[in-house]
Image (cartoon, coloured by chain):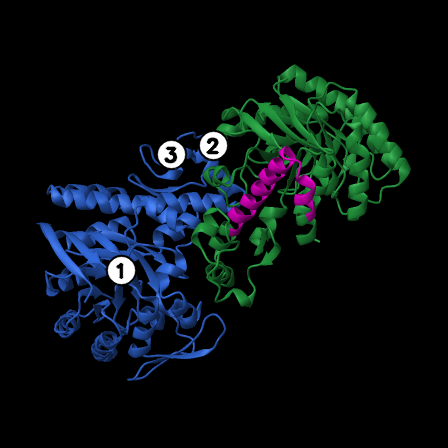
Chain colours: A blue, B green
């Protein structure tokens, strides 16, 4: 198992850690930019390195559809294909099962699904997911899980949980036949405390290298997300990384770190950037606003990203006004830089026991 | 007049020159990337510097509509606004008069035109064009001309020519009241030899800092473009820069240099790049082609651009296949690098009297 995790410091429940992976070291807590179609939208690998990204996330299901396993194997994995030298974590496709309901059919063995690209039918099993993630050659593989939809009733949540446990066993068994890639198990259980507890117990009983909390931040109220995390995180072993799947808002991130989470990912910072929204230490900013027409200051004073060092709000507003994609590029750079800067400041604040103060500031500006 | 031009070497009719401008030196012959809406599409200023761009072109009419003169004046010109440190040449809006026929009305005094953005009406005069280009603070201003449509009859071509001459006088007079920016006159005359001769005589009699051949490469047959250039270029003074407006195909560029042209511009390299076409020393390449699915080689072997040093045809093909804009970004970088590399090799070949050999190779590969 090609993963070593150190907890360097604990402050309250917040953890300052370090994950050693085949393609490098990941300092935690950290945000992971999402690269769905073998790229983080609008970003070159150089841009990603410059904003300080340590690890990016790839989507197994999307990469399986395109470019396909043949191309991934031809390049001996995603690192060569996209020319990214640092670690990659791949999701398992479980979340796509959840989000693509059209033509979906779930069986004990796996999931029938229709390609959103061309309508072709595919049968995704834990074993296939492992084969895909093996072809991608990611540093961290995720177990194939069943992510229940919000509003699922208790009986169906039990079924989803039980499938998730069985699929976790099969995922672990299969990946060990294929490679020594690190693999994380995923805790499900919807919004039921007893099911979260049961899932955590079953999943953590297996020899995973880390554990994820899945099935949250999928549309439920913020309080529920937080309560389920507060309840579930302590059930995960202290000596392994904890990953909350799908968290990108600064507010949620500091609340997750407060609860002992180490890594998180989301398309949020890149997606809102493409729509003209900047993330700053003073909260969100709509760069399209008319008031910025004559504003020579950067998006954020003192920010060291390429965008803030070189361009004014006035210019970026103009680019959005004219629909020029360069505006989207510049805001994507800024927003990812902000997320990495936030991650860095979280790490520093844990080291010097000032995390709760930082958390308070972020919660105030992202109320 | 803030322009100094040196002819360093002549080989046949081809000229190796150097233009000194307020924002730097431009080695000629050279291609100028086009930045219509205050940016070269998808390119940061850093990207442009890295591909070797020496001077970029801005469009006065587009910049007048957006961001508008108030914003341009607020930033004291385009250089600060877009954070581009090197020279900028602006066209005058004359070509837009030609291309936007909807709602257009031409008078002796100027041109009524409708904004393609919001339908608002504007009256563009030579004086307004100079005010716009003064607000942009470009290194080289273009006189406001009347670019006749292809297929114009002789009588109307005469009228267009006469207006162009009168507007040239007014442009020159106005810019000298406003600034010491360098200004180029534009020779028109459609596809009639006697009118080209008359226009060249009238325009070159004025105290312009350089001269452009306008109204060509607007849809006419290649032979006509070439014959009119062959006829017109020798009518322009040898000690001033010669600019062919709207040339971006490698074939046309070497034929223009063969006829003594120094600078040229076009959206072609960036536009075809966004559609998946790469320019290479072996000719055009459609990167979307299925045969590149398993091709680990770069777009062009030996190419030193960021794209070719880091990515395979296989990867770029995948990005286009998935509609990921990063593919367009990478091909734009490559194509602009190719144009600047072509310009550089043209300069070197003039210096060592091997330009005709280089021209022969380009003509063969871009037949």
Q: Which mark is residue A309?
A: 3
Residue where numbered disc 1 is placed: A221
Residue A83 pos. (x, y %): 38, 55
Distance from disc 1 to disc 3, alpha carbons, whole Å, reads 38 Å
Q: Which residues are magenta?
A: B331-360
Which is more toward the observer, B241 or A129?
B241
Residue A292 pos. (x, y %): 44, 34
Distance from disc 2 to disc 3, alpha carbons, whole Å, reads 10 Å
Q: Which mark is residue B83?
A: 2
Q: Are marks 2 and 3 on the same chain?
A: no
Q: Is A317 situated left or right of B132 in this image?
A: left
User: Was residue A345 drawn as part of the magenta stretch in this picture?
Assistant: no
Q: Is A132 situated left or right of A321 in this image?
A: left
Callout 1 crowding tier (Cα within 10 Å): few <14, some 14–19, many ≥20: few
Q: Is A129 situated left or right of B17 in this image?
A: left
Q: Is A196 situated left or right of B287 in this image?
A: left
Residue A6: quadrant of the picture: bottom left
Q: Chain of mark 3?
A: A
């Amino acid at each position: 198992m090609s993963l070593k995790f150190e907890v360097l410091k604990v402050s309250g429940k917040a953890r300052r850690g370090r994950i050693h992976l085949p393609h490098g070291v990941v300092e935690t807590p950290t945000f992971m930019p999402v690269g769905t179609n073998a790229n983080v939208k609008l970003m070159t690998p150089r841009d990603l390195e410059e904003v300080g990204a340590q690890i990016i996330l790839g989507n197994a299901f999307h990469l399986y559809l395109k470019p396909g396993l043949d191309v991934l194997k031809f390049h001996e994995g995603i690192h060569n294909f996209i020319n990214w030298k640092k670690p990659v974590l791949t999701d398992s496709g479980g979340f796509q099962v959840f989000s693509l309901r059209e033509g979906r059919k779930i069986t004990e063995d796996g999931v029938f699904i229709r390609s959103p690209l061309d309508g072709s039918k595919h049968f995704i099993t834990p074993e296939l997911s492992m084969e895909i993630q093996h072809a991608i050659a990611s540093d961290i593989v995720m177990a194939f899980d069943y992510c229940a939809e919000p509003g699922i009733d208790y009986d169906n949540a039990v079924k989803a949980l039980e499938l998730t446990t069985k699929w976790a066993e099969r995922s672990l068994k299969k990946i060990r036949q294929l490679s020594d890639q690190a693999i994380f198990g995923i805790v499900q259980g919807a919004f039921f405390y007893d099911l979260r507890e049961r899932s955590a117990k079953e999943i953590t009983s297996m020899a995973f290298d880390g554990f994820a909390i899945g099935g949250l931040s999928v549309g439920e109220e913020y309080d529920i997300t937080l309560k389920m995390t507060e309840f579930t995180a302590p059930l995960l072993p202290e000596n392994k990384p904890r990953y909350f799947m799908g968290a990108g808002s600064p507010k949620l991130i500091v609340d997750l770190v407060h609860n002992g989470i180490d890594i998180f990912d989301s398309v949020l910072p890149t997606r809102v950037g493409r729509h003209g929204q900047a993330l700053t230490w003073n909260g969100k900013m709509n760069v399209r606003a008319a008031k910025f027409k004559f504003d020579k200051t950067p998006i954020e004073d003192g920010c060291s990203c390429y965008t803030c060092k070189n361009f004014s709000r006035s210019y970026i507003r103009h680019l959005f006004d004219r629909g020029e994609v360069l505006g989207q590029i510049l805001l994507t750079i800024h927003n990812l830089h902000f997320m990495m800067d936030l991650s860095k400041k979280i790490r520093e604040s844990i080291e010097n026991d000032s995390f709760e103060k930082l958390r308070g500031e972020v919660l105030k500006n992202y109320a």
